[in-house]
């Protein structure tokens, strides 16, 4: 694999504050690379330097082996595009948003039309061309942003928290699109996220960025082996440690304390740590018969509004975080104190 | 009371029949205020864009000055310009006192703080990431600035309309620099003031109705346009 972009001793200061401190990093052509770090750790600054939107205070950047300078910066910028954390759309139709960058690339009208159509198909927004972009839902707006970036077919795609606060459906469409574009077009993707599950799912390499410094680079497994480093910022909901024993059916049963046992599709025993994604847990008001191996009765002890989704803290002896859509939350007339049932499959229990 | 009602009826008659004096004064008002607004936009727009889009030392102070100038009494500005253009003063050689050109220049200067302040506000109200977004999509610095301008079109249009309305409804400068000379510098506001003083209420009311119609219809058209854009 060849190196697409390389940072050599990159430092960026904002007045006295050091946002990035002596960053040495190589991104290989065709890989999906994730930057994991808390708010203010420098993730966005690093991406904006890659996008040539911010100049580093010191250090050198190489793009495709060529040192980036003031003269050739424009050329590298056209090989790169970025999707911002906060969805930014032009106040016009979906079509005109997606077409904006294509207008600078000297393409024929037919090519432009094709690229727009392809990009919208990638993010499952076919037929939305004439809709006013800012009137779409939050998730759809973020998908328009992604389509606008994809239409350019750049060598490097930078994504700043692309799925922050999105509901599971939009999140999975965006994640699928990212993986597919990387697989089919070989686009190199650098993504900043808080979401360790996302990092684990779609990337090969992860870097931990803490206080402007790269503290660790490795595979998701290598990074997640020591969750203590992630605890301060990453989404570490429903992480439980306990003693596992192997059952007759090949699953493991983990005693996580307070009389709560979790069944997992793994043949591990002894001290282990597992997690369950909040969106993988089904919540109901009545006991439901299903294939889920884990069913618990509990009480809602906390509710957090996350925009289009709601996160509930449910005490079943141990506290679980469950994510449901706001619509479901309203329809089920849930509140703190409501008695509920949680269910999740043994295959939804992941080992850390 | 009956005198006023009679005046209104006569005024409507003057408008409906297209009275030559009413038409002449209305057209002159539109031309002078329109040209003044156009002139002001030409010099105010680049200044406003620079202040709105760039960060520099003293930016807040400069914005404060333009905000303060919004409250400048028109009579005072008229007096200052009169002293500059009057016989024997520094720019008397231009010969634009009691001349439509003097009125255009005066009104253009009057509405400059309005254009600058409102354009700055609308440019600053645009999401700051729009510029960065345009750049990441391949726009140059200039093209990215154009993207910001496009996003603030509604606010810019509002600035232009507010300036035109201010110019056409303004009396002090029109009177002091124009002198209300019949068939030459008389405009809606100066004629309304003069005819009311003389007791010719129908003409004053007719011109008042026209002035109101112009201001209202332009504001209404702007609103409709903005709603359509959204």
Image: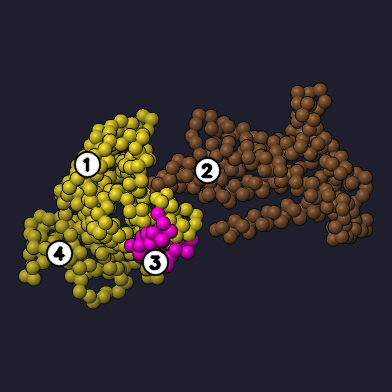
Chain colours: A yellow, B brown
Q: Which residue is the site of mark 2?
A: B124
Kindly indicate whether the residue at mark 3 contacts the one at mark 4 (C-beta within 8 angstroms). no
Q: Nearer the viewer, mark 4 or mark 1?
A: 1
Q: Which residue is the site of mark 3?
A: A126
Question: The magenta stretch spans which residues?
Answer: A107-136
In the image, what residue occupies the spot 67% across and 43% down? B38
Q: Nearer the viewer, mark 1 or mark 2?
A: 1
* Measured Cα–Cα span from mark 4 to mark 3: 39 Å
Of callouts 4 and 3, the N-terminal one: 3
* Measured Cα–Cα span from mark 4 to mark 1: 37 Å
In the image, what residue occupies the spot 30% across and 36% down? A68
Of callouts 1 and 3, the N-terminal one: 1
Res A121 → quadrant: bottom left
Of callouts 4 and 1, the N-terminal one: 1
Query: Can residue A234 be seen?
Result: no
Q: Nearer the viewer, mark 2 or mark 4?
A: 2
- On screen, residue A258 versus residue B106, left or right, reads left
Q: Which residue is the site of mark 4?
A: A264
Give the class, few, some or many, for how many residues have Cα within 10 Å of label 2's Cα (few <14, many ≥20). some
Query: x, y percentage for residue B68?
Result: 64, 35
Res A299 → quadrant: bottom left
- For label 2, the SS is helix
Viewer-proximal residue, B114 or A317?
A: B114
Query: x, y percentage for residue A308?
Result: 39, 61
Q: Is residue B149 magenta?
A: no
Q: Which residue is the site of mark 1?
A: A26
Q: Nearer the viewer, mark 4 or mark 3?
A: 3
In the image, what residue occupies the spot 57% across and 41% down? B120
In the image, what residue occupies the spot 35% across and 48% down? A81
């Amino acid at each position: 694999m060849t190196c697409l972009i390389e940072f050599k001793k990159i430092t960026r200061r904002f007045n006295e504050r050091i946002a990035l401190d002596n960053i040495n990093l190589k991104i290989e052509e065709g890989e999906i690379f994730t930057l994991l770090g808390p708010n203010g750790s420098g993730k966005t600054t690093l991406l904006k330097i890659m996008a040539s939107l911010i100049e580093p205070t010191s250090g050198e950047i190489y793009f495709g082996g060529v040192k980036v300078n003031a003269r050739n910066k424009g050329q590298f910028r056209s090989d790169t595009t970025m999707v911002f954390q906060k969805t930014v759309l032009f106040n016009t139709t979906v079509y005109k948003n997606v077409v904006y960058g294509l207008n600078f690339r000297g393409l024929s009208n037919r090519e432009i039309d094709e690229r727009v159509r392809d990009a919208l198909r990638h993010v499952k927004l076919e037929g939305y061309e004439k809709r006013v972009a800012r009137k779409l839902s939050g998730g759809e707006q973020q998908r328009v942003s992604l389509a606008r970036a994809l239409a350019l077919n750049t060598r490097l795609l930078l994504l700043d928290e692309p799925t922050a606060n999105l509901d599971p459906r939009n999140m999975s469409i965006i994640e699928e699109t990212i993986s597919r574009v990387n697989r089919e077009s070989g686009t190199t993707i650098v993504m900043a996220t808080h979401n360790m599950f996302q990092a684990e799912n779609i990337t090969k390499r992860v870097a931990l960025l803490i206080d402007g410094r790269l503290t660790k680079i490795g595979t998701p497994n290598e990074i997640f082996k020591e969750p203590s480093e992630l605890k301060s910022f990453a989404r570490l909901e429903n992480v439980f440690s306990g003693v596992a024993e192997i059952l007759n059916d090949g699953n493991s049963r983990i005693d996580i304390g307070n009389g709560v046992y979790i069944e997992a599709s793994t043949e591990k025993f002894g001290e282990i740590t597992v997690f369950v994604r909040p969106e993988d847990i089904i919540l109901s008001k009545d006991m439901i018969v299903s294939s889920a191996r884990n069913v618990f009765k509990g009480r809602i002890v906390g509710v957090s509004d996350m925009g289009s989704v709601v996160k509930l803290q449910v005490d079943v002896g141990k506290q679980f975080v469950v994510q449901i859509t706001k619509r479901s939350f309203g329809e089920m007339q849930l509140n703190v104190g409501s008695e509920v049932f949680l269910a999740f499959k043994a295959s939804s229990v992941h080992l850390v | 009371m009956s005198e006023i009602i009679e005046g209104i009826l006569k005024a409507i008659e003057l408008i409906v029949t297209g009275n030559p004096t009413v038409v002449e004064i209305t057209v002159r008002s539109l031309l002078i205020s329109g040209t003044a607004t156009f002139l002001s936009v030409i010099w105010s727009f680049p200044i406003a864009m620079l202040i709105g889009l760039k960060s520099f030392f003293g930016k807040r102070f400069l914005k404060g000055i333009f905000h303060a100038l919004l409250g400048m009494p028109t009579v005072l500005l008229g007096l200052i310009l009169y002293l500059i253009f009057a016989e024997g003063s520094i720019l008397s050689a231009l010969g634009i006192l009691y001349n439509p050109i003097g009125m255009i220049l005066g009104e253009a200067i009057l509405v400059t703080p309005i254009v600058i302040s409102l354009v700055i506000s609308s440019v600053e109200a645009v999401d700051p990431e729009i510029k960065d977004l345009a750049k990441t999509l391949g726009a140059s610095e200039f093209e990215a600035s154009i993207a910001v301008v496009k996003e603030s079109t509604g606010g810019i249009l509002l600035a232009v309309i507010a300036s035109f309305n201010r110019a056409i409804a303004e009396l002090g400068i029109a009177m002091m620099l124009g002198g209300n000379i019949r068939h030459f510098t008389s405009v809606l506001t100066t004629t309304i003031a003069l005819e009311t003083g003389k007791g010719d209420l129908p003409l004053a009311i007719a011109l008042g109705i026209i002035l109101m119609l112009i201001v209202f219809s332009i504001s209404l058209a702007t609103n409709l346009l903005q709603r359509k854009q959204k």
